[in-house]
Image: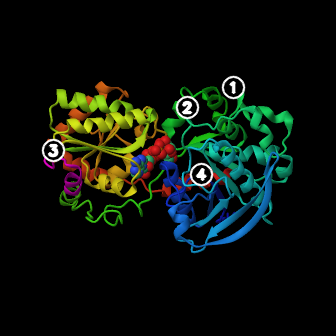
Protein backbone atom coordinates (compact mmCIF):
# COMPACT_ATOMS: atom_id res chain seq x y z
CA UNK A 1 0.00 0.00 0.00
CA UNK A 2 1.29 3.44 -0.87
CA UNK A 3 0.93 6.17 1.74
CA UNK A 4 0.88 9.72 0.47
CA UNK A 5 1.94 12.48 2.83
CA UNK A 6 0.72 15.95 2.00
CA UNK A 7 2.35 19.03 3.45
CA UNK A 8 -0.37 21.17 4.92
CA UNK A 9 0.38 24.83 5.32
CA UNK A 10 -1.30 26.24 8.41
CA UNK A 11 -2.54 29.75 9.16
CA UNK A 12 -1.40 30.68 12.68
CA UNK A 13 -2.48 33.88 14.44
CA UNK A 14 -0.15 34.95 17.26
CA UNK A 15 -1.75 37.34 19.76
CA UNK A 16 0.71 39.15 22.01
CA UNK A 17 1.36 42.35 23.96
CA UNK A 18 4.94 42.54 22.64
CA UNK A 19 6.78 41.85 19.40
CA UNK A 20 10.33 42.93 18.53
CA UNK A 21 11.11 45.38 16.90
CA UNK A 22 7.66 46.94 17.23
CA UNK A 23 7.50 46.98 21.03
CA UNK A 24 9.66 45.00 23.44
CA UNK A 25 10.01 45.01 27.21
CA UNK A 26 11.78 41.65 27.46
CA UNK A 27 12.04 38.15 26.05
CA UNK A 28 8.34 37.89 25.12
CA UNK A 29 9.00 40.53 22.46
CA UNK A 30 12.01 38.66 21.11
CA UNK A 31 10.12 35.39 20.86
CA UNK A 32 7.03 36.81 19.15
CA UNK A 33 9.30 38.74 16.76
CA UNK A 34 11.10 35.54 15.74
CA UNK A 35 8.89 32.45 16.05
CA UNK A 36 6.35 33.56 13.35
CA UNK A 37 9.17 34.44 10.97
CA UNK A 38 10.63 30.95 11.24
CA UNK A 39 7.18 29.38 10.99
CA UNK A 40 6.73 31.24 7.70
CA UNK A 41 10.12 30.06 6.52
CA UNK A 42 8.95 26.53 7.23
CA UNK A 43 6.09 27.07 4.76
CA UNK A 44 3.26 28.20 7.04
CA UNK A 45 1.38 31.46 7.22
CA UNK A 46 2.01 32.95 10.66
CA UNK A 47 0.71 36.42 11.50
CA UNK A 48 1.07 38.61 14.57
CA UNK A 49 -1.59 40.84 16.07
CA UNK A 50 -0.71 43.21 18.90
CA UNK A 51 -1.79 46.56 20.38
CA UNK A 52 -0.91 49.74 18.52
CA UNK A 53 1.28 51.61 21.01
CA UNK A 54 2.92 54.93 20.15
CA UNK A 55 6.33 53.44 19.42
CA UNK A 56 9.08 54.55 17.03
CA UNK A 57 8.24 51.61 14.82
CA UNK A 58 4.71 52.93 14.38
CA UNK A 59 5.88 56.39 13.45
CA UNK A 60 8.60 55.20 11.02
CA UNK A 61 6.62 52.66 9.00
CA UNK A 62 3.68 52.58 6.60
CA UNK A 63 0.42 50.87 7.38
CA UNK A 64 -2.84 50.07 5.55
CA UNK A 65 -6.20 50.01 7.27
CA UNK A 66 -7.62 46.48 6.94
CA UNK A 67 -10.63 46.59 9.26
CA UNK A 68 -12.75 49.01 11.19
CA UNK A 69 -14.93 47.73 13.99
CA UNK A 70 -17.22 48.88 16.76
CA UNK A 71 -17.54 46.97 20.01
CA UNK A 72 -17.81 47.46 23.76
CA UNK A 73 -16.32 46.95 27.18
CA UNK A 74 -19.48 46.89 29.29
CA UNK A 75 -21.32 50.12 28.69
CA UNK A 76 -18.36 51.78 26.98
CA UNK A 77 -18.72 51.44 23.20
CA UNK A 78 -15.67 52.18 21.10
CA UNK A 79 -14.39 52.19 17.54
CA UNK A 80 -11.27 50.20 16.78
CA UNK A 81 -9.09 49.93 13.70
CA UNK A 82 -6.81 47.13 12.54
CA UNK A 83 -3.83 48.31 10.53
CA UNK A 84 -1.29 46.18 8.70
CA UNK A 85 2.36 46.95 8.02
CA UNK A 86 2.62 47.26 4.23
CA UNK A 87 6.00 45.75 3.33
CA UNK A 88 6.09 42.49 5.30
CA UNK A 89 9.64 43.49 6.31
CA UNK A 90 9.49 41.53 9.56
CA UNK A 91 9.02 38.24 7.74
CA UNK A 92 5.34 37.96 8.75
CA UNK A 93 2.15 39.99 8.46
CA UNK A 94 1.99 42.41 11.35
CA UNK A 95 -1.42 43.72 12.46
CA UNK A 96 -1.85 46.45 15.07
CA UNK A 97 -5.04 47.12 16.98
CA UNK A 98 -5.74 50.79 17.43
CA UNK A 99 -8.15 51.76 20.18
CA UNK A 100 -8.11 55.49 20.56
CA UNK A 101 -7.34 56.61 24.13
CA UNK A 102 -6.78 53.07 25.40
CA UNK A 103 -3.83 51.45 23.62
CA UNK A 104 -2.14 54.35 21.81
CA UNK A 105 0.31 55.20 24.59
CA UNK A 106 4.10 55.23 24.80
CA UNK A 107 4.62 52.44 27.30
CA UNK A 108 3.53 48.82 26.93
CA UNK A 109 2.66 48.25 30.59
CA UNK A 110 2.39 50.18 33.80
CA UNK A 111 -0.89 52.08 33.56
CA UNK A 112 -3.68 51.91 36.15
CA UNK A 113 -6.12 50.82 33.48
CA UNK A 114 -3.97 47.97 32.11
CA UNK A 115 -6.79 45.46 32.82
CA UNK A 116 -9.17 47.46 30.61
CA UNK A 117 -6.46 48.04 28.00
CA UNK A 118 -5.67 44.37 27.50
CA UNK A 119 -9.34 43.40 27.74
CA UNK A 120 -10.20 45.95 25.04
CA UNK A 121 -7.35 44.58 22.92
CA UNK A 122 -8.56 40.98 23.24
CA UNK A 123 -12.20 41.86 22.54
CA UNK A 124 -11.15 43.78 19.40
CA UNK A 125 -8.99 40.87 18.18
CA UNK A 126 -11.79 38.33 18.59
CA UNK A 127 -14.33 40.71 17.04
CA UNK A 128 -12.06 41.16 14.04
CA UNK A 129 -11.45 37.42 13.57
CA UNK A 130 -15.21 36.89 13.84
CA UNK A 131 -15.66 39.13 10.80
CA UNK A 132 -13.41 36.97 8.58
CA UNK A 133 -14.92 34.79 5.90
CA UNK A 134 -12.56 31.94 6.74
CA UNK A 135 -11.20 30.52 10.00
CA UNK A 136 -7.49 30.39 10.92
CA UNK A 137 -6.06 26.96 11.75
CA UNK A 138 -4.93 28.01 15.20
CA UNK A 139 -4.97 31.04 17.48
CA UNK A 140 -1.77 31.10 19.53
CA UNK A 141 -2.02 33.44 22.52
CA UNK A 142 0.95 34.55 24.63
CA UNK A 143 0.86 35.20 28.39
CA UNK A 144 -2.01 36.62 30.39
CA UNK A 145 -2.50 39.71 28.21
CA UNK A 146 -4.11 37.42 25.63
CA UNK A 147 -5.15 34.72 28.11
CA UNK A 148 -8.89 35.42 28.05
CA UNK A 149 -9.25 34.75 24.32
CA UNK A 150 -9.70 30.96 24.70
CA UNK A 151 -12.52 31.67 27.20
CA UNK A 152 -14.15 34.21 24.89
CA UNK A 153 -14.15 31.77 21.97
CA UNK A 154 -15.76 29.08 24.08
CA UNK A 155 -18.20 30.90 26.33
CA UNK A 156 -19.03 34.41 25.05
CA UNK A 157 -22.39 34.01 23.25
CA UNK A 158 -21.43 36.35 20.44
CA UNK A 159 -18.32 34.36 19.50
CA UNK A 160 -19.39 30.81 20.18
CA UNK A 161 -19.50 30.07 16.45
CA UNK A 162 -15.69 30.31 16.61
CA UNK A 163 -15.38 27.66 19.31
CA UNK A 164 -13.90 25.08 16.96
CA UNK A 165 -10.80 27.13 16.28
CA UNK A 166 -7.98 25.43 18.21
CA UNK A 167 -6.19 27.63 20.74
CA UNK A 168 -2.70 27.35 22.20
CA UNK A 169 -1.51 29.36 25.20
CA UNK A 170 2.22 29.85 25.67
CA UNK A 171 3.28 30.80 29.17
CA UNK A 172 6.39 32.94 29.11
CA UNK A 173 6.03 33.94 32.72
CA UNK A 174 3.50 32.61 35.23
CA UNK A 175 4.46 35.19 37.87
CA UNK A 176 2.20 37.72 36.15
CA UNK A 177 -1.40 36.56 35.92
CA UNK A 178 -3.46 39.70 35.26
CA UNK A 179 -5.72 39.30 38.33
CA UNK A 180 -8.98 41.30 38.18
CA UNK A 181 -11.83 41.76 40.62
CA UNK A 182 -15.28 40.35 39.78
CA UNK A 183 -16.46 43.94 39.39
CA UNK A 184 -14.78 43.82 35.99
CA UNK A 185 -16.61 40.69 34.81
CA UNK A 186 -19.26 42.79 33.04
CA UNK A 187 -16.52 44.15 30.75
CA UNK A 188 -16.30 40.80 28.98
CA UNK A 189 -18.70 40.28 26.06
CA UNK A 190 -21.89 38.61 27.43
CA UNK A 191 -20.89 35.12 28.58
CA UNK A 192 -22.43 31.94 29.89
CA UNK A 193 -22.80 32.65 33.63
CA UNK A 194 -22.56 28.93 34.48
CA UNK A 195 -18.97 29.03 33.33
CA UNK A 196 -17.67 31.53 35.88
CA UNK A 197 -15.33 28.82 37.17
CA UNK A 198 -13.45 29.03 33.88
CA UNK A 199 -12.45 32.60 34.71
CA UNK A 200 -11.75 32.15 38.39
CA UNK A 201 -8.81 31.20 40.60
CA UNK A 202 -8.79 31.77 44.35
CA UNK A 203 -11.70 34.17 44.35
CA UNK A 204 -10.74 36.53 41.54
CA UNK A 205 -10.75 36.60 37.77
CA UNK A 206 -7.38 35.23 36.77
CA UNK A 207 -6.72 35.60 33.02
CA UNK A 208 -3.68 33.30 33.05
CA UNK A 209 -5.55 30.57 34.95
CA UNK A 210 -8.49 31.01 32.57
CA UNK A 211 -6.15 30.56 29.60
CA UNK A 212 -4.75 27.37 31.15
CA UNK A 213 -8.26 26.02 31.71
CA UNK A 214 -9.72 26.98 28.34
CA UNK A 215 -6.88 26.71 25.79
CA UNK A 216 -6.71 23.43 23.90
CA UNK A 217 -3.00 23.14 24.65
CA UNK A 218 -0.63 24.99 26.96
CA UNK A 219 3.09 25.33 26.42
CA UNK A 220 5.88 26.65 28.62
CA UNK A 221 9.13 28.04 27.23
CA UNK A 222 11.38 25.32 28.66
CA UNK A 223 10.95 21.77 29.97
CA UNK A 224 12.34 22.37 33.43
CA UNK A 225 10.05 25.37 33.96
CA UNK A 226 7.02 23.16 33.33
CA UNK A 227 8.22 20.75 36.03
CA UNK A 228 8.87 23.60 38.44
CA UNK A 229 5.41 25.12 37.92
CA UNK A 230 3.83 22.15 39.67
CA UNK A 231 5.57 23.21 42.87
CA UNK A 232 6.11 26.95 42.39
CA UNK A 233 3.70 28.86 40.14
CA UNK A 234 2.71 31.91 42.15
CA UNK A 235 -0.44 30.21 43.40
CA UNK A 236 -1.30 28.12 40.31
CA UNK A 237 0.56 24.94 41.34
CA UNK A 238 -2.58 22.82 41.75
CA UNK A 239 -3.89 23.98 38.39
CA UNK A 240 -0.70 22.94 36.62
CA UNK A 241 -0.86 19.59 38.36
CA UNK A 242 -4.49 19.12 37.31
CA UNK A 243 -3.99 20.25 33.70
CA UNK A 244 -0.62 18.57 33.17
CA UNK A 245 -2.04 16.39 30.39
CA UNK A 246 -2.37 19.32 28.05
CA UNK A 247 0.86 21.08 28.96
CA UNK A 248 4.13 20.68 27.08
CA UNK A 249 7.52 22.40 27.35
CA UNK A 250 9.01 23.77 24.12
CA UNK A 251 12.35 25.52 24.53
CA UNK A 252 12.67 28.98 22.96
CA UNK A 253 15.16 29.52 20.18
CA UNK A 254 17.05 32.70 19.34
CA UNK A 255 16.86 34.72 16.16
CA UNK A 256 20.24 33.99 14.61
CA UNK A 257 19.69 36.69 11.99
CA UNK A 258 19.42 39.43 14.63
CA UNK A 259 21.87 37.96 17.15
CA UNK A 260 25.00 37.23 15.17
CA UNK A 261 28.41 38.66 16.16
CA UNK A 262 29.47 38.48 12.50
CA UNK A 263 26.74 40.82 11.26
CA UNK A 264 25.04 42.47 14.29
CA UNK A 265 23.96 45.93 13.15
CA UNK A 266 24.19 47.33 16.69
CA UNK A 267 27.97 46.76 16.95
CA UNK A 268 30.83 48.02 14.77
CA UNK A 269 33.45 45.38 15.48
CA UNK A 270 32.30 42.05 14.16
CA UNK A 271 33.88 38.68 14.84
CA UNK A 272 33.37 34.95 14.43
CA UNK A 273 34.35 31.79 16.25
CA UNK A 274 37.74 32.05 14.49
CA UNK A 275 38.36 35.67 15.44
CA UNK A 276 36.64 36.00 18.81
CA UNK A 277 39.80 36.73 20.79
CA UNK A 278 40.57 40.02 18.97
CA UNK A 279 36.92 40.77 18.16
CA UNK A 280 35.69 40.55 21.72
CA UNK A 281 38.65 42.54 22.96
CA UNK A 282 37.85 45.45 20.62
CA UNK A 283 34.29 45.55 21.90
CA UNK A 284 35.51 45.27 25.48
CA UNK A 285 37.79 48.23 24.89
CA UNK A 286 34.82 50.37 23.80
CA UNK A 287 32.89 49.36 26.92
CA UNK A 288 35.85 49.94 29.23
CA UNK A 289 36.50 53.40 27.76
CA UNK A 290 32.87 54.37 28.00
CA UNK A 291 32.30 53.04 31.52
CA UNK A 292 35.69 53.64 33.06
CA UNK A 293 36.63 50.01 33.54
CA UNK A 294 39.93 48.16 33.51
CA UNK A 295 40.40 46.14 30.32
CA UNK A 296 42.94 43.82 31.93
CA UNK A 297 40.44 42.36 34.34
CA UNK A 298 37.56 40.01 33.47
CA UNK A 299 34.33 41.86 32.71
CA UNK A 300 31.20 40.43 34.33
CA UNK A 301 27.86 41.84 33.22
CA UNK A 302 24.20 41.66 34.18
CA UNK A 303 21.48 42.67 31.72
CA UNK A 304 17.83 42.60 32.66
CA UNK A 305 14.90 43.72 34.69
CA UNK A 306 16.04 44.70 38.19
CA UNK A 307 13.41 42.61 39.96
CA UNK A 308 13.33 39.80 42.49
CA UNK A 309 12.67 37.15 39.83
CA UNK A 310 16.05 37.91 38.28
CA UNK A 311 17.82 37.97 41.65
CA UNK A 312 18.80 41.60 41.00
CA UNK A 313 18.44 42.53 44.67
CA UNK A 314 21.31 40.14 45.44
CA UNK A 315 23.75 41.93 43.16
CA UNK A 316 24.92 44.76 45.45
CA UNK A 317 25.97 42.45 48.26
CA UNK A 318 27.40 39.79 45.94
CA UNK A 319 29.52 42.42 44.21
CA UNK A 320 30.61 43.98 47.53
CA UNK A 321 31.49 40.55 48.97
CA UNK A 322 33.44 39.59 45.86
CA UNK A 323 35.55 42.73 46.02
CA UNK A 324 36.14 42.11 49.70
CA UNK A 325 36.84 38.36 49.66
CA UNK A 326 38.27 37.74 46.19
CA UNK A 327 39.89 41.11 45.69
CA UNK A 328 39.52 43.83 43.10
CA UNK A 329 40.35 41.43 40.33
CA UNK A 330 37.25 41.84 38.14
CA UNK A 331 34.95 44.48 36.64
CA UNK A 332 31.17 44.62 36.90
CA UNK A 333 28.86 46.40 34.47
CA UNK A 334 25.09 46.34 34.94
CA UNK A 335 22.34 47.34 32.51
CA UNK A 336 18.75 47.35 33.64
CA UNK A 337 15.83 49.03 35.27
CA UNK A 338 13.21 47.95 37.77
CA UNK A 339 12.72 48.28 41.52
CA UNK A 340 13.69 51.84 42.55
CA UNK A 341 15.48 50.60 45.71
CA UNK A 342 17.70 48.26 43.68
CA UNK A 343 18.36 50.98 41.09
CA UNK A 344 19.34 53.41 43.86
CA UNK A 345 21.63 50.93 45.61
CA UNK A 346 23.40 49.97 42.39
CA UNK A 347 23.78 53.63 41.50
CA UNK A 348 25.19 54.53 44.88
CA UNK A 349 27.89 51.86 44.50
CA UNK A 350 29.43 53.87 41.67
CA UNK A 351 31.08 55.98 44.34
CA UNK A 352 33.11 52.94 45.45
CA UNK A 353 34.38 52.04 42.00
CA UNK A 354 38.12 51.82 41.40
CA UNK A 355 37.65 51.65 37.65
CA UNK A 356 35.94 48.32 38.17
CA UNK A 357 32.22 48.98 38.60
CA UNK A 358 29.52 50.80 36.67
CA UNK A 359 25.81 50.68 36.03
CA UNK A 360 23.47 52.03 33.34
CA UNK A 361 19.92 52.39 34.59
CA UNK A 362 17.44 52.21 31.74
CA UNK A 363 16.54 50.21 28.68
CA UNK A 364 19.07 50.37 25.85
CA UNK A 365 19.00 47.85 23.01
CA UNK A 366 22.25 49.16 21.45
CA UNK A 367 24.20 48.92 24.66
CA UNK A 368 22.90 45.43 25.38
CA UNK A 369 24.35 44.12 22.09
CA UNK A 370 27.69 45.79 22.78
CA UNK A 371 27.74 44.22 26.24
CA UNK A 372 27.04 40.70 24.92
CA UNK A 373 29.90 41.26 22.48
CA UNK A 374 32.45 42.83 24.83
CA UNK A 375 31.92 40.99 28.12
CA UNK A 376 33.71 37.91 29.40
CA UNK A 377 30.91 36.58 31.63
CA UNK A 378 27.19 37.21 32.13
CA UNK A 379 25.63 36.69 35.53
CA UNK A 380 22.03 35.39 35.85
CA UNK A 381 21.21 34.59 39.49
CA UNK A 382 17.48 34.22 38.66
CA UNK A 383 15.03 32.98 41.26
CA UNK A 384 12.62 32.22 38.40
CA UNK A 385 13.64 31.87 34.75
CA UNK A 386 11.02 30.35 32.45
CA UNK A 387 13.54 30.22 29.63
CA UNK A 388 15.96 33.14 29.58
CA UNK A 389 17.33 34.41 26.31
CA UNK A 390 20.29 36.38 27.67
CA UNK A 391 22.37 33.26 28.30
CA UNK A 392 21.75 32.02 24.74
CA UNK A 393 22.64 35.39 23.19
CA UNK A 394 25.70 35.56 25.42
CA UNK A 395 26.92 32.12 24.35
CA UNK A 396 26.54 33.01 20.67
CA UNK A 397 28.73 36.06 21.38
CA UNK A 398 31.33 34.05 23.28
CA UNK A 399 30.35 35.40 26.70
CA UNK A 400 30.35 32.69 29.37
CA UNK A 401 27.04 32.35 31.27
CA UNK A 402 27.00 32.07 35.07
CA UNK A 403 23.52 30.86 35.86
CA UNK A 404 21.41 29.58 38.67
CA UNK A 405 20.29 26.02 38.17
CA UNK A 406 16.64 26.74 37.35
CA UNK A 407 14.10 26.68 34.49
CA UNK A 408 15.45 27.36 31.04
CA UNK A 409 18.90 28.13 32.47
CA UNK A 410 19.14 24.54 33.61
CA UNK A 411 18.03 23.34 30.15
CA UNK A 412 20.57 25.40 28.19
CA UNK A 413 23.74 25.65 30.30
CA UNK A 414 26.00 22.78 31.42
CA UNK A 415 28.71 23.53 33.96
CA UNK A 416 32.20 23.50 32.46
CA UNK A 417 33.29 21.13 35.23
CA UNK A 418 30.85 18.48 33.93
CA UNK A 419 31.18 16.30 30.86
CA UNK A 420 30.80 18.45 27.72
CA UNK A 421 30.09 21.58 29.78
CA UNK A 422 30.72 25.23 28.92
CA UNK A 423 29.19 27.52 31.54
CA UNK A 424 29.10 28.09 35.29
CA UNK A 425 26.10 26.81 37.22
CA UNK A 426 25.18 27.30 40.88
CA UNK A 427 22.29 26.01 42.93
CA UNK A 428 20.88 28.84 45.01
CA UNK A 429 19.89 32.42 44.40
CA UNK A 430 21.98 33.42 47.40
CA UNK A 431 24.89 35.78 47.86
CA UNK A 432 27.29 32.98 48.89
CA UNK A 433 26.58 30.93 45.77
CA UNK A 434 26.92 33.94 43.50
CA UNK A 435 30.22 34.97 45.08
CA UNK A 436 31.58 31.48 44.68
CA UNK A 437 30.53 31.48 41.00
CA UNK A 438 32.35 34.79 40.58
CA UNK A 439 35.47 33.26 42.10
CA UNK A 440 35.23 30.36 39.62
CA UNK A 441 34.77 32.83 36.77
CA UNK A 442 37.89 34.78 37.73
CA UNK A 443 39.89 31.55 37.85
CA UNK A 444 38.55 30.42 34.50
CA UNK A 445 39.40 33.80 33.01
CA UNK A 446 43.07 33.39 33.85
CA UNK A 447 43.18 29.83 32.47
CA UNK A 448 43.55 30.91 28.82
CA UNK A 449 43.51 27.45 27.34
CA UNK A 450 40.37 26.27 29.12
CA UNK A 451 38.57 29.59 28.64
CA UNK A 452 39.20 29.62 24.91
CA UNK A 453 38.10 26.01 24.59
CA UNK A 454 34.86 26.83 26.42
CA UNK A 455 34.20 29.89 24.26
CA UNK A 456 34.85 28.04 21.03
CA UNK A 457 32.50 25.27 22.07
CA UNK A 458 29.73 27.66 23.20
CA UNK A 459 29.81 29.79 20.08
CA UNK A 460 29.09 26.73 17.97
CA UNK A 461 26.06 25.55 19.94
CA UNK A 462 22.82 25.59 17.98
CA UNK A 463 19.99 27.50 19.65
CA UNK A 464 18.22 28.32 16.39
CA UNK A 465 14.43 28.23 16.10
CA UNK A 466 14.18 25.32 13.65
CA UNK A 467 13.72 22.54 16.22
CA UNK A 468 11.16 24.46 18.28
CA UNK A 469 9.22 25.52 15.18
CA UNK A 470 8.81 21.90 14.27
CA UNK A 471 7.57 21.08 17.78
CA UNK A 472 4.99 23.90 17.66
CA UNK A 473 3.76 22.79 14.24
CA UNK A 474 3.43 19.18 15.42
CA UNK A 475 1.49 20.45 18.41
CA UNK A 476 -0.91 22.51 16.23
CA UNK A 477 -1.37 19.57 13.91
CA UNK A 478 -2.27 17.32 16.82
CA UNK A 479 -5.26 19.61 17.39
P1 LIG B 1 12.74 38.52 30.51
O1 LIG B 1 11.86 38.42 29.33
O2 LIG B 1 12.24 37.76 31.68
O3 LIG B 1 13.06 39.93 30.87
P2 LIG B 1 14.74 37.17 28.83
O4 LIG B 1 16.10 36.66 29.15
O5 LIG B 1 13.84 36.22 28.18
O6 LIG B 1 14.14 37.81 30.16
O7 LIG B 1 14.85 38.38 27.80
C1 LIG B 1 15.32 39.61 28.12
C2 LIG B 1 15.50 40.38 26.83
O8 LIG B 1 15.40 41.77 27.12
C3 LIG B 1 16.84 40.19 26.19
O9 LIG B 1 16.73 40.45 24.80
C4 LIG B 1 17.68 41.27 26.88
O10 LIG B 1 18.82 41.62 26.14
C5 LIG B 1 16.67 42.39 26.92
N1 LIG B 1 16.85 43.37 27.98
C6 LIG B 1 16.50 43.26 29.28
N2 LIG B 1 16.76 44.39 29.95
C7 LIG B 1 17.29 45.24 29.06
C8 LIG B 1 17.77 46.59 29.14
N3 LIG B 1 17.75 47.27 30.28
N4 LIG B 1 18.23 47.16 28.00
C9 LIG B 1 18.25 46.46 26.85
N5 LIG B 1 17.82 45.21 26.71
C10 LIG B 1 17.35 44.60 27.79
C1 LIG C 1 9.63 35.72 29.97
C2 LIG C 1 10.58 34.97 30.88
C3 LIG C 1 11.89 34.62 30.23
C4 LIG C 1 11.68 34.09 28.83
C5 LIG C 1 10.85 35.07 28.02
C6 LIG C 1 10.60 34.61 26.60
O1 LIG C 1 9.77 37.07 30.02
O2 LIG C 1 10.80 35.65 32.09
O3 LIG C 1 12.58 33.66 31.01
O4 LIG C 1 12.91 33.86 28.19
O5 LIG C 1 9.62 35.28 28.63
O6 LIG C 1 9.87 33.41 26.54
Circle nearer the viewer, 2 or 3: 3
Please provide percent x and percent y for residue 451: 20, 46
Look at the image and name its color scheme: rainbow
* Residue displayed at 20% across by 35% down: 352
| Residue behind mark 1 | 202
Please tell me whether residue 450 belongs to the stretch shown in magenta. Answer: no
* Dot 1 or dot 3, earlier in sequence: 1
* Percent position of residue 156, x then y: 82, 46
Residue 362 seen in render: yes
The 10 Å Cα crowd at callout 1, few under 14, some 14 to 19, many 20 or more, is few
Q: In what element is the residue under mark 2?
A: helix
Residue 126 against residue 414 in the figure, above or below: below
What number is the disc on residue 297?
3
Q: Is mark 1 within 8 Å of ligand 2?
A: no
User: Which element is circle 1 on?
Assistant: loop
Q: How many marks?
A: 4
Tell me whether the residue at label 4 lies in contact with that at label 2, contact meaning CB atoms closer than 8 angstroms.
Answer: no
**Residue 186 relative to residue 316: left or right:** right
Find out if the beta carbon at label 3 lies less than 8 Å from the nearest ligand 1 atom.
no
Q: Which residues are magenta?
A: 285-297
Q: Which residue is mark 4?
A: 17
Rendered-image quadrant of the N terminus: bottom right
Q: CA distance from mark 2 to mark 1?
A: 17 Å
CA–CA distance in space, label 4 to label 2: 23 Å
Answer few, some or many: residues within 10 Å of disc 3's Cα (few below 14, many 20 plus, some between 14 and 19): some
Which mark, residue 229? 2
Is-magenta flag for residue 291?
yes
Q: Residue at x 18, y 60 (%)?
A: 278
Amino acid sequence: MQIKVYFESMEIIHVSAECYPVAKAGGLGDVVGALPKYQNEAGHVAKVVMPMYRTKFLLNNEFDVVHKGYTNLGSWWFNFTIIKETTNKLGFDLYLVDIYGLLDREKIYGYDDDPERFLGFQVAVVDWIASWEHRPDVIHVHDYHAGLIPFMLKYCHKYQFLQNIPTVLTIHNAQYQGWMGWDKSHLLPAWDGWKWGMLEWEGTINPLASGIKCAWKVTTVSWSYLDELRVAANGLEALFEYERGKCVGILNGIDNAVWDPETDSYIDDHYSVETFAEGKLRNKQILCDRFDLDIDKPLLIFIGRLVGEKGADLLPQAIGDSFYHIGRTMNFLILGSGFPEVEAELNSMKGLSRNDYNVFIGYNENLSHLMYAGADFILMPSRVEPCGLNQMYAMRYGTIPMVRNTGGLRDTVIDYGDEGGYGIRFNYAAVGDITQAIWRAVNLYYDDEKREEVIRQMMQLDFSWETSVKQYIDLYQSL
